[in-house]
Amino acid sequence: MTALDRFDDVGVDLDDRFVATVEIRRPPHNFFDGELIGNLASTFEALDEDPRCRAIVLCSEGKSFCAGAQLGGGGAKKNAQAAPREPDTKAPHLYDKAVRLFRTQTPVVAAIQGAAIGGGLGLALMPDFRFAAPEARFAANFARLGFHHGFGLSVTLPDLVGRSRAMELLYTGRRVRGEEAHAMGLCDRLVPLEGLRSAASDFAAEIAASAPLAVRSIRETLRGDLAERIRIATDREKVEQERLQKSQDFREGVRAMGERRTPSFTGS
């Protein structure tokens, strides 16, 4: 196992075009927790220091790109959209690890083959570009579960689709399929599923063919204070998630999800 490919749930492949393919390996739905986000951040930071890498393709093994957070002991499906809290309060919060992803320096292209739901949508919006299959679907379904969104979506979602559309998606939690996502700017290119990864990789190779110092400098200029804005946003998102987890509506939202029924919220 190499220094880059040292995590069971994150695979890395470097090709001769200076493109690294980073694959999340928790199929079929690639639920995340603090460990996975930390592993991704460590991998991206290592690639920043590797002269063989000038661009990254982020993809996932299995049916979903990332169907949300998996935390606690109740199993992946039960905890798919649970609010992401770390069990050890002395350990870095999951969102602190997410900020590390936004601080990395190498351009990233996401290849989104399936669901990017809840925190998985937050992860999908971290890269510079998103290539998606028509089968992909996107949802910020936090309010349908009775709590606040996270993973920096307060910043990334309105930056991509505008404030009004972002509020619509966050208030309603509705699912958006690939075609609509492309039309609203949530993804940059729509590509048939069978050619998705190769299209993302070819585009990453175009980036990698440019002067790497110039690309990093341009990226730093254009992204500006994005990572700091994410840090500030996630500081509030953490507080609001913890507050709303104590509500009756949150308990009802989680119950309704498990029972596959429409929640009945009371505002308490």
Image (cartoon, helix red, strand yellow):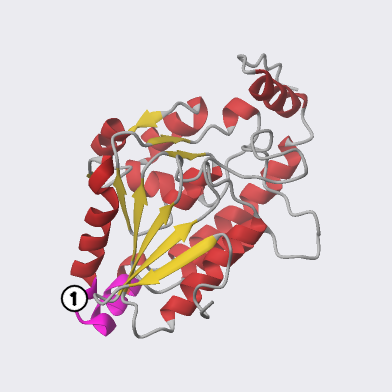
**Left or right side of 66 for 238:** right
Q: Amino acid at mark 1?
A: Ala
Indicate yes or no whether the magenta region holds residue 10. no
Start and end of the magenta stretch? 208-220
Indicate yes or no whether the magenta region holds residue 210. yes
Quadrant housing the C terminus? top right
Q: Which residue lies at the image location 33% right of the left edge and 33% below the top edge?
A: 135
Q: Looking at the magenta stretch, what is its main secondary structure? A: helix
Q: Nearer the viewer, residue 190 or 140?
A: 190
**Left or right side of 92 for 198:** left
**Residues packed near mark 1 inside 10 Å, few (<14), some (14 to 19) or many (20 plus):** some
Q: Position of residue 11 (x, y in %)?
A: 48, 64
Q: Position of residue 201 (x, y in %)?
A: 26, 61
Quadrant housing the N terminus? bottom right
Tell me which corner region of the image, top left, top right, bottom left or bottom right, holds residue 113.
top left
Q: Which residue lies at the image location 53% right of the left edge and 80% below the top edge?
A: 3
Query: Which residue in the structure is indicated by mark 1?
Result: 209
- Determine whether 259 is above or below 102 in the image: above
Where disc 1 sits, the SS reads loop
- Determine whether 234 is above or below 46 in the image: above
